[in-house]
Each structure stands twice: as C-alpha cells, then as structure tokens.
Image (tube, coloured by chain):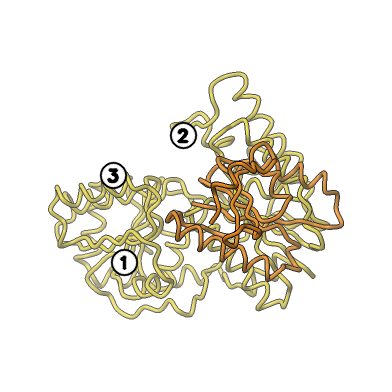
Chain colours: A yellow, B orange
Amino acid sequence: MRVVVANSHIPNVHGGAEELALNLVTELGKLRGLSVELLRVPFDWSSQEGLLTHVMGLQNLDLGSTDLLIPLKFPVYFLRAPRRIGWIVHQFRQAYDMHGGPFTYFEESQKGDDIRRALIEADNLELPQYDRLFTNSSVTQDRLFRYNGIASDILHPPVNEPDRFICEDHEDFIFVGGRINGSKRQKMVIEALGSFAPDVRLVIAGPCEDPDYLDQMKYLIEIHDLQDRVQLRPEFLPRSEIVSYNNRCLAAVYLPMDEDSFGYVTMEAFQSSKAVVTTVDSGGVTQLVKDTTTGFVTEPNPESLGAALQELWINRNATKDMGRAAFDRLQDFGLTWNRTLEVLLS
Amino acid sequence: MRGIIVFEDLFDPDPLLRSQADVWGASLRDMDDMPFEVLHLPWSDTASPVSQLFGLSLLLLDRYEEICVLQPQGLALTGQSVFFLSPDGPKGGTRSRVTGGEIDRDVAMQEQT
C-alpha cells in the first residue's frame, strides 16, 4: 500500500504538526512496512481572497498511484485519493473559534463574511466524505462537531522516541521549550521571574519565529537584571539537546494560548517525569496538567505564574513527586506508536 | 527563502532531478545568500495535464520570496517571483524570470549563473 502523509507547509516554521508528520511517516514505514511519502504543500493565508482558490487548486492536483492519503491540516485535506483517513490537527481556526475575537482575520464586510461562510461550507462538504476521521484532541474534536456537525474520534499523538526521555537529574533550572513567539508567552515567564520568583533560573530554548518578540524578551531580561538567571537559546535545537534539557531540568513551563492538543512540550516533560506549569487558558495542555498533582495550572499573569515557579523551586521534594505523578498520568493514556497506527489504520 | 519546486510521481522520484534542484539551490545561495529548500509536488503523467496545471496555478506560494522551477509545468505557478532554471546556459545554467506563465528571454540573458 502506498501512503501519502500530507501537511501544509510554511517556510521556517517547524512545530508540533510538522513533528507529527515526520514521525508518522517514519513509524508507518518502520512498524507497518508501508511505502510512505511526506507531501508538504506550501500555504499562505495573507490574502482572504486566495483561500478558496488554494482549496480549488488542491482539489485539482493528482496524487497518482497513492492508495491512502492521511492529511493533518487545513487545507491539505482537500487533496483527493482513493482512500482518505484524516487526522485533523487544525482546521482554519480563523473561520471558527478565532472569528470575532482579538485575532479576527476576515474583513468586516459582506465579502469577508461570504468567504468565511464558503470556507466553512467547504469543510462541511469535504470532511464527511472521508473514510475515517480522527482529531488530535478533544478541543479539535469539539470544534469540528460544534461548528460543522461532523463527528470524529480522538487520536492523541504519542511522544516520539519516548525511551530517550528519562529523569536523569533535577538540576537548578526550569525548562521553557517550544517555538518562541507571542502565542507561547515566554515574555510572561520572564516577567514572572523578574518580579515574583526571586530564586528561579530558566533555560528558554526553541526556534524563534518573531524577531521583534525576541527583542522584547531580551529587553525584559535586561531591565529585570536577569542575565544570570535566564539562559536564552533562540534557535532550532537538535533533538538530543531537547531530550537533555527535559531529562535534567527541575520542571518545565509551557504557556500556549488556547492550544488544541496536549503539546509535545508538555508530553516530553511528563515522559521525563517532570512537573509542568501552565495557565488556565492554555487549552488542551490543561487536560494533561492537573493543578498541584502533576504541576500547576495558574492564572495567566506574572504574579500567579511567579508564585508557582517559586513553589516548585523551594519545595523540591513536592516537585519531584509531581514529576513522578506526571509520568504516571501520561502512561495512563497508553500513547504508543504501535497502538496509534493500529487505530489509525483499522 | 527560495523555494525550488520539483514535480514528480511521489513514489517514483527522479534522483537526477532532485540532485539538480539541490545543486541549483546551493549555487544560487552562494550568489545571493538566500536560504533555500527543495519541495516536491505531485505530478502524474497519466492524469489530465490541464486539470493539474489549473490546480498548480491556484496554489498560494507567497511565503517564498522566490520560486524556482526546473520543469515546464512549473510555469503555471504564481508567486512574488518565479524563475525557470535551465541547464543550457553558457556558464552551465540559466535562471530566467517567468512572467504570466512565459519565460522572459530578455531577463534570462541577464540572469546567467
């Protein structure tokens, strides 16, 4: 069987969906012996007018001898193949839950409204034609059902290379991993450290997607005089270094705004038996992190966050206990690639 | 970012074409320091070329500062700047600007690499 895993592609962006696509390709080949290719289709949403034509463009491409298509994101789920199993990580959220809020994308006009409704209608027509439909979290599943009336099954992505994540130590730093941009709110962690967590040390490491945001982080580090307590590595790290930071840190912090899934940052920290601090508005992350049990779920402000960080730093035994509970909680989900592929291909 | 796009049967890739795309990307980067990546888009010799060309012409590629293609179906692409790369220039290759789906020969003369 010839399988194409398809993903939307934006130059210089490598996040959870890209990581999932790469590992899905690898595991389908390794564990199932299938012939698998990764198809990355460039996507640009700078023009609302172009969205529908891009969808139409995808519908006219031909995947040749492909037997099975597994797309992960809007708009590549409009590609055609004899058999299609969707593992939906993202719809075009600007047409759904992000519409009408601070991140409203479509222009407030009849035209903007028409394009948005046409995109929703396109999803309504396309996705029910799939042979199977999975979503990566209950947040994505709920959105798909609430806005489109389309049912799906949840299939959480497993941790990649889980055996590499082992608690080696609890060194004197808290790890802040993941992409560096405004939606991941690394600035709030720095502000928390500067005013409300006087002893804590951080390592902030990940690829930077927003140079202006990085400049603001550096400015905060400077004005709070945190140069000795914050190590900043705004770069794409080799996998071995991500593993190492997780395995050696005291705990981890991950504050995405309304993330759909558990997040690899959370899952990798849990796999390394480390507690995670997140905020009540971090979406799917809060379904994994349980307040005071496997970490802290705080209000999204520097004061609450700083108090949680200081607590982790001072009460080391409790922090280690939460880390062990975090590992157990992740194992309870039984997320392995073998099991995942069994469900996906069933 | 420069995107060099290769069209192929996803399960029967042309290693020579892939190699040429990598060499082109590295050569152009040496000239202007623009980073590049090679992407593979599907092309089926047995399916309707009209439908496929129509599909390609609708894709949104503006995240790339420059798109380069090595095959004629790439002329259907639109973007901020689209160039056709051909190995027939006097210095080993020619980069020709594509305007409205056609190669601009005048510009090609100035873009020899």
* Mark linked to residue A301: 3
For the residue marked with disc 2, what is the amino acid?
A: Phe
Circle 1 Cα neighbour tier, 10 Å, few/some/many (<14 / 14–19 / ≥20):
many
Q: Residue at x 81, y 44 (%)?
A: B51
Q: Chain of mark 3?
A: A
Q: Position of residue A202 (x, y in %)?
A: 25, 62
Q: Are marks 1 and 3 in contact (CB under 8 Å)?
A: no
- Give the residue pinned by disc 2: A103
Pointers 2 and 1 in contact (CB under 8 A)?
no
Residue that extends furthest to the front in the rendered view of this protein: B90
Q: Is residue A58 above or below residue A121?
A: below
Q: Which residue is mark 1?
A: A251
Numbered disc 1: secondary structure: strand
Where residue A227 sits, quadrant-wise, is bottom left
* Amino acid tagged 3: Asn
Percent from the top left, x then y, of residue A73?
Answer: 62, 50
> Between disc 2 and disc 3, whose residue precedes?
2
Find numbered disc 3 in the image and state the secondary structure of the residue it sits on.
Answer: loop
Residue A328 location, quadrant: bottom left
Do the residues indicated by labels 1 and 3 lie within the same chain of the protein?
yes
Q: Give the chain letter at badge 1.
A: A
